[in-house]
Amino acid sequence: MDYDSKLVEKAIRDGHTITTKLKKATSDEEIDLLKKEIEAYGDFVDEAFGKIDKDDVLQERNCELSLLLYLAAESKSVHMSYAPHNHKNNNYELEKFEEYLDGKSWL
């Protein structure tokens, strides 16, 4: 499927912007403040790039990017709760999200 290059660029740019903010977050409260931005990003990529699963009763469009970003944010939050002094792995899932984002295999 051919996608509008401006929408692809926006998805990549906005995805990196959010992950940069998440990487800088040092508390659950800071991550919680980004939830609306994460949800808005998810809605955007689902609508612009999502596919409908034939088995989905609701027939909603879903893009892997929205799920992966949500999971990466949750992973960072959990990691900060259980290993707050081990900053080495705090952003691992966010970095993997960015690699996936840049790889464009979600298109």
Image (spheres, grey):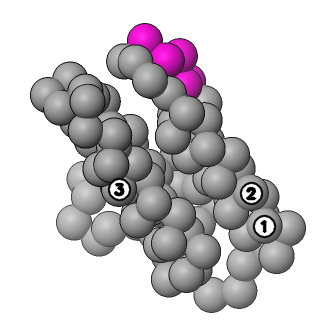
**Magenta stretch mostly in which secondary structure?**
helix
Q: Are marks 1 and 2 in contact (CB under 8 Å)?
A: yes
Mark 1 neighbour density, 10 Å: few (under 14) some (14–19) many (20 or more):
few
Instruction: Tell me residue 14's x, y (percent).
Output: 70, 50
Question: Could you tell me the amino acid type at mark 2?
Answer: Arg
Label placed on residue 92:
3
Q: Can residue 11 be seen?
A: yes
Percent x, y for residue 44?
63, 48
Q: Which mark is residue 13?
A: 2
Q: Nearer the viewer, mark 2 or mark 3?
A: 3
72 or 62, nearer to the observer: 72
Q: Which residues are magenta?
A: 29-36
Residue name at image x 62 percent, y 87 percent: 1
Q: Which residue is mark 1?
A: 9
Q: Which element carries disc 1, helix, strand or loop? A: helix
- In this rendering, the answer to whether 2 lies above or below 66 is below
Q: Nearer the viewer, mark 1 or mark 3?
A: 3
